Structures are given as structure tokens and as C-alpha cells.
Image: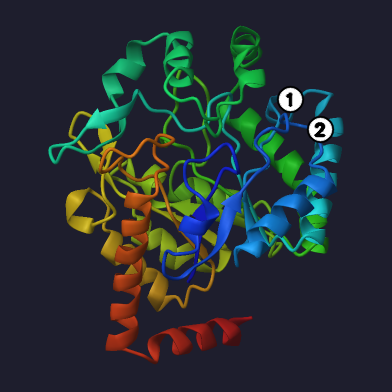
Amino acid sequence: MRMVFRWFGEQNDTVTLDQIRQIPGVEGIVWALHDIPVGEIWPKERIQELQTLAEHHGLHIEVVESVNIHEDIKLGLPSRDQYIANYKQTIKHLGEAGVKVICYNFMPIFDWLRTDLHHPLPDGSNSLFYEYSRIENIDPFELVMQIQSNSALTMPGWEPERLAHLTELFEAYQGFTEEDLWRNVQYFLDEIIPVAEANGIQMAIHPDDPPWSIFGLPRIIRNQENIRRFLSLSDSPSHGITLCTGSLGANPDNDIIGMVHEFAERIPFTHIRNVKVEPNGDFQETSHRTQDGSVDIAGVVEAYHEEGFTGYCRPDHGRHLWDEQCRPGYGLYDRALGIMYLWGLWDAHALRNPKSLAAAQQRKEDTV
């Protein structure tokens, strides 16, 4: 398991590279050029600038999250070919810089969705919260205004240039079905996976967050069956998933440990976080500790260890602790605590059975 930490860039993150490098076991940052509009090519010189900065702090840039997909690609419009051509060029530029994984998603209009970015927890901290019944009744425009007003920093997946055309986007998705989305993701993969493979990059799709339809929009990466179908669209080693325990864990029916075992060979990147799911469908993000939420984090880490996981891992959204002023979900303190919890679980398995990881890796090699 290779530990990395999401970072949004200078002047766009309250966490510094000097702080990240002090977290035990963290070897790289998970990054993106957040100021580049979706659909445009990422310039080589900008990538190189960030690479130089990260390496100056002893960190690599091998994981990108994310090169977002233009809505015209998801909708299958004639203009998608130009946006896909731009995407291919960005893949090439990233490959030249040594990037190994690109995490992306294929969710229409909205990326992750929450109703409260600072919901209180009993211990006095606060975190991201999803109120199920409110989403059923809220106007999406009202929600956008609420999200955008909650932070002076950019919010990943909530690009202003996309949200400025919300009315037109909802009109474009009228009558759009899950099968339409499946056809369009297949078209996209057929075009970009060969380029990713030629450049030594694994494309790793992120599950829908939350893993169900919102505002009548289709979502297709929601459960084990969906992921199985998605992975069947290409047998390339560059075609994989970002297994996110928090996104999938919002639905208690999802067997995340089973997914780790079934899809281990196709998981180059994982997000590990915990959520507390209520019977009415509400969920709130908690500490990474297993007992604090509904996801068996200890079991997930054990499954990864048994499978000889050598991919990248990052602690996902954390609570806001000790009066830290930070981007919602992305402070320093709770994510650093989460890393140490994950390392503790991992190291405990290694100490109990020091040969298990080597044996699992050998099994993987024997099946290739």
C-alpha cells in the first residue's frame, strides 16, 4: 500500500507540502490543475511546475484526481470528439511527467453531493452530511448556491463554468437513461484507454457519490454489479477503478470487502473513509475508526493486505477538528489521524503474518 495525500495547490489549500511530508508514510500528493477549465488541455509547463514543487518537498505526483470529463462527452454530443482529443493530449502530457494513475468520474452534472458541509458531531467536531429527505425536495439551484457560498476555496467537482449553465444541462439530460450513459462511457473508453496504456497510465473511475440517482439524473457506478459490468468494457490493464469506501459505503447493501477481493487486480487507487449511515438514509462522515461509522474499515484494510495490495491509497474526507479552518472535508488533522489509523491496521497484519503480503503478491504474479 502506497500512501498519498490530496492537495489542491498553492494559494488554494490550507494544508502545505511541508505539513504533508511530515505525515509518516506519505510519499506523494494527489493533485489536479483546478484552474484549467474542464475540456481544455493541461499545459506541459504547468504540470512540470507542480512536479518540481512537489519533488522539492520529497513528494511525487504519480496520482492525479481528476482530469474531469466534459458534459458533452457524457451526453454523447457531436462536440465530444474534440474534448476527447484534448483529453488524450492531457494523458500524454501527464505520462511524460511520470503520472501512473488518473482518477476520474462519469457522474452527470454533479460530482459528490452533500446537504451540509459543517454538520456537528457529538464530540464537538463537524463534517460533511447528507440529508436524504432534503435532497428529495430541494431545488438543485438552491443547493448549488449553498455549496458555493461555503468556501472561499475551489470545491472539487463543482466547477463554476459548468454550474453556470445548470438550466441548459438539466434540459440536455431530459429523457437521458442509464443505458445512454453506458453507451457514452464505452465510447469514451474505446478512445482513451489505448492512449493511457501507451503512456503507462491506469485510468481509475470513482464510484458515484452518493451511489444512487439524484435529481432524476442517471448514475451507473453504484454497486458491485455495476463495477463488474464497467470493468468488462475493456480488458486493458489501464482500465480500473478507484474503490472509495465512503461513496459505496453510503449504501449499506454494498459489500465493500467483497469488492476488494473480487476487483483487487483492477484497483490501482483506493479512497478509505468512514460514514455513519442512519436508517432513514441520512449519512455523515466520521473518523476513519471502524467503530465510529458503518463501514468496516478494519475489514477493508485486512482484505487489501490479504490481496497483496500495492496500489495507492489516500485517506478521504476528514472531520474538521480543533477549530481548523479548511476546505470542507480536506483539513490536515483528521486526515493525518486517518493515515495513522490505516497504517496501524496494515502494520498489525504484517506483524501477525509477515509472509502474508509476499505470499499474496506471489499468487498475483503466478496468475499473470
On the image, the x and y values in percent for residue 186 come to 71, 42
Q: Which quarter shows the C terminus?
A: bottom right
Residues at circles 1 and 2 in contact by the CB criterion of under 8 Å: yes
The residue located at (39%, 39%) in the rendering is 329
Nearer to the camera, 146 or 325: 325
- The residue lying toward the viewer, choosing from 254 and 96, is 96
Quarter-of-image position of residue 239: bottom right
The answer to which quarter of the image holds residue 120 is top left
In the image, what residue type sits under mark 2?
Tyr
Residue 273: tell me if it is visible.
no
Q: Which residue is mark 2?
A: 83
362 vs 190: above or below: below
50 relative to 199 in the view: left or right: left
**Residue 358: image x %, image y %?**
47, 88
- Real-space Cα distance between discs 1 and 2? 8 Å
Which label's residue is closer to the chain start, 1 or 2? Answer: 1
Q: How many marks?
A: 2
Q: Residue at x 24, y 57 (%)?
A: 289
- Numbered tag placed on residue 72 in the rendering: 1
Please tell me how crowded label 2 is: few (under 14), some (14-19), or many (20+) other residues with Cα within 10 Å. Answer: many
